[in-house]
Image (tube, helix red, strand yellow):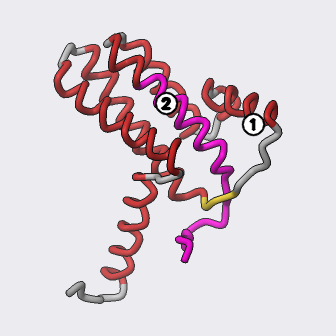
Amino acid sequence: MAQVCPISTKRVDSNMVRVISFQVALFTTALLFTKESIFALVMLFDFFMRTLRQSHLSPFQIVGNFVLKGWGIAPKLCDEMPKRFALYMGLVISLFLVVFYMADVSVIATVITIVLLICALLETLFDFCIGCKIYYTIQVAKGFVKHGRNIK
């Protein structure tokens, strides 16, 4: 049974999400090996633009549009809200990356970078979104709390 969002009827192209997550994985890998904060800054800017729904300013979205149109890949629609929640998580994680890399706290920055890389690769390779799973878990928990049900 497919999970659906009870809050929003908006849909997004999961192929675009996967192309963008591939780019996040590339930038995260570059960040991991070079420790250059410019990669974290680019990801922060990209996540921020997409969070503000200014995708025409998102470098990853622009490349994604070029790839999907160039290869003629048809959209595969999925619920927006879980992907949006994952986008917010990406924004927060990339903000932490910028702060930790610029403050030269490399151990914490490396751990966070590896977590982001794993999440991006899971989305890219297997269409498995960690942020979406967290979103659905929160929605289920809110349903139990809202209706006074006890989890046993």
Judged from this view, the residue extending furthest toward the front is 125
Q: Position of residue 103 (x, y in %)?
A: 22, 15
Q: Which residue is mark 2?
A: 24
* Above or below, comparing residue 40 to residue 144 in the picture: above
| Quadrant of residue 61 within the rendered picture | top right
Left or right: 61, with 40 as reference point: right
Residue 94 location, quadrant: top left
C-alpha separation, residue under disc 1 versus residue under disc 2: 16 Å
Q: Which residues are magenta?
A: 1-28
Identified at 75% across, 36% down, the residue is: 68
Report the quarter where the C terminus lies. bottom left
Q: Amino acid at mark 1?
A: Leu
Q: In the image, is 18 to the left or to the right of 63?
A: left
Q: Position of residue 96 (x, y in %)?
A: 30, 30
Q: Residue at x 61, y 28 (%)?
A: 60
* 130 or 80, nearer to the observer: 130
Magenta segment: does it hold 27? yes
Q: Residues within 10 Å of mark 2 (few under 14, many from 20)?
A: many
- Where is residue 87? Give x, y as percent: 49, 44
Q: Is residue 37 magenta?
A: no
Q: How many neighbours does mark 1 have within 10 angstroms: few (below 14), some (14-19), or many (20 or more)?
A: some
Is residue 56 toward the left or the right of residue 127 in the image?
right
Find numbered disc 2 in the image and state the secondary structure of the residue it sits on: helix
Amino acid on which disc 2 is placed: Val
Toward the viewer: 18 or 142?
18
Residue depicted at x 53% and y 71%: 3
What mark, if any, has residue 23 been given in the picture? Answer: none
Measuring from the top left, give residue 136's x and y in whole percent: 43, 66
Which residue position is annotated with label 1? 68
